[in-house]
Amino acid sequence: MKVSIKVNGKQYEADIEPRLLLVHFLRDQLNMTGTKVGCDTSQCGSCTVHLDGKALKSCTYLAVMADGSSVTTIEGLGGSGLHPMQESFWEKHGLQCGFCTPGMIMATTAYLQHHPQPTEEDIRQHLEGNICRCTGYQNIVAAVKSAAEKMAGGD
Amino acid sequence: MMDKTKTVVIGQSIRRIDAPGKVTGATPYPGDIDLDGQLWMKICFSQRAHARVLKVDASAALALPGVVAVFTSHDVPVNEYGLVMKDQPVICGPGGTIAGSDIVRCYMDYVAVVVAETEALAAQAAALVQVDYADLPPVFDAEAAMQPEAPLIHHNTPGNLLSHYRIRKGDMDEGWARAAVIVEDVYETTWQEHAYLQPEAGLSYIDEEGRVTVVVAGQWTHEDQEQIYHALNLPPEQVRVIYPAIGGAFGGREDMSVQIVLALAAWKLRRPVKIIWSRTESILYHHKRHPIKIRTRWGAAADGKVVAAEATVIGDAGAYNYTSNKVMGNANLMVSGAYEIPNLHIDTYAVYTNNIPTGAFRGFGAPQALFAAEGQMDRLADALGMDRVALRRRNVFQEGSLLAVGTPLPAGVSMDKVLDQCASASYWAQTAAGWQYQPPQQPADPARRRGRGLAIGYKNCAAARPRPGHRL
Ligand code: FES
Ligand code: FES
């Protein structure tokens, strides 16, 4: 099937199998491997991207469903530099192995758009769709908090 | 800021050098790496817990267009591997020179490996591989496996007994005679999955100098390399192992998964070969934390001094050793807890069964053993009518204390202080009558109750090359 999907600001036209998942379209056809596959069953959140501004688990979404939409992946989040969320994950040690990190960052950046001043409890609640096996979450929560503060401060 | 004229790092917050690649998605993990012309692999796992493999028929799989090769036991030059001891066939099946390499001993044994032009084709072909088995009696319980009538899982391991460690310290009769209270219980733990987020994945290819190269996530680069060149019967310099970003391990990658078969396929086919396990495959086909059964009996004098402890510790190693003898060695040392106990009698066993192999996992045998030790301390405190912190404070290791095996602890032991601080921060207080638990106020909502437990953990921590006789 022919699809036209905008990814990180660039329009891609492709002829794909109807059963192709969005995550495999990104990883295998566009070579954007920053979006990870941790579970392939919608549980771990490693595959989170933005679809028209909303966080979405791309392992459970057909690429054809994204026809005409705009997708942002971890590769496109920061533009030419680092997004404040990326900076905060770095500064606050919000990662160890880093495999969950792209998904964590995509999930939390989408969240902050509508909840710019989350409490620690809000952040924890919102992260229930993303699994991290390394960090114990403390520093992830700290990173999200710090990013929210930075973004509110306008820097 | 860090003073660049001196290399002072302690007390400084150093920015991680690996973070930029990880927060931008630029860092490649094993599943992210591709090469032009690569083939895809799927593994056929055993469909029996214990059986002799009589025949592997790959003709239907090979007849599918796009299937490049199916490798079986016949293709592995030296059909054995293992991190500590080489007790596992690379691919189980007939025809080898190594005794027992035709036997599958658990559901995670390999019986064939399929290589095809696409991942989907490889999966389709794997389902077509026909295997004839002659069933053997299985045993799924470690204690049952120790009985004389139990089926033998490895011909050279009588009683299925991989290792037996003993600690004999002091005089047990004297210890029990001093005890005012004695508590006895059985503690059992179960398997546990590492669930690192990057499932097993890798890519193998022949590099520009003709060496077979495996890009994979692991925890022992050189041990992986050694096991690969041993199985492929190649000189060491013909095999390279490269670890990109790992994607979590927690002990679960100490033992190998896809390494040897990837190398075998790339070596034979002279083309890059890739594999990525699904989460389902990852959970089914790599080792777990040991289930351990601990029968234990502890005695304390009226003043709270623990005077004697005995324990029988049985770990289910599953079908292959992996690091079982080392893990159980650790459990053996830890099962008397972080306490100096003058009289000890401990027997610790690692036992083969037809369950999934067990091995390294954060804590390496200590968590299971400490679970029993701390349970015993709580029971002793209750039996004595003594506070749980006070009892631990009375017995906890100090500088110079002797470990269960008689090793004196060096200077710098701070367990007593750590215990004091944790207790003070957790609803305990030092009163005129000694340590006392001061229960927290309960939230009004009855669905939200707050409780506090207290346990001490300790663990040895040093580089240990996992080979007999090579402890550093
Ligand atoms: S890979 Fe999509 S949620 Fe885990
Ligand atoms: S950093 Fe490893 S899973 Fe989160």
Image (spheres, coloured by chain):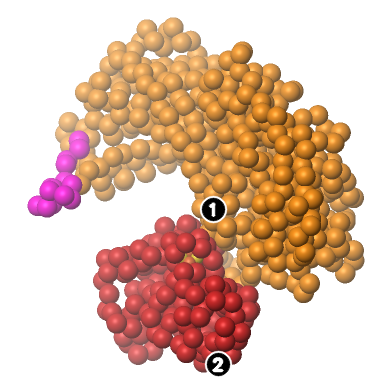
| Position of residue B340 in the picture relative to residue B166 (left or right) | left
Q: Which residues are magenta?
A: B436-449
| x, y percent for residue B452 | 25, 42
Crowd band around label 2 with a 10 angstrom C-alpha radius: few (<14), some (14–19), many (20+): some
State which chain disc 1 sits on: B
| x, y percent for residue B93 | 77, 38
Q: Which residue is mark 1?
A: B280
Residue A99 magenta-highlighted = no
Residue at x-position 33% and y-position 83%: A113
**Residue B325: in sight, yes or no?**
no
Q: Nearer the viewer, residue B37 or B244?
A: B37
| x, y percent for residue B195 | 51, 53
> What secondary structure is the magenta-colored segment mainly?
loop
Residue at x-position 50% and y-position 60%: A39
Considering the image in quadrants, where does the C terminus of chain B appear? top right
Residue at x-position 39% and y-position 38%: B456
Write down which chain is painted red: A
Q: Which residue is mark 2?
A: A11
**Total numbered labels placed on residues in the image:** 2
Q: Secondary structure at mark 2?
A: strand
Q: Amino acid at mark 1?
A: Thr
| x, y percent for residue B87 | 73, 34
In the rendered image of the structure, the colour used to display chain B is orange
Q: Is residue A21 above or below residue B69?
A: below
Q: Amino acid at mark 2?
A: Gln
State which chain disc 2 sits on: A
| Position of residue B443 in the picture relative to residue B427 (left or right) | left
| Position of residue B52 in the picture relative to residue B452 (left or right) | right
**Residue B308: in sight, yes or no?**
yes
Q: Nearer the viewer, residue B198 or B144?
A: B144
Q: Is residue B330 above or below residue B294?
A: below
The picture quadrant where one finds residue B152 is: top right
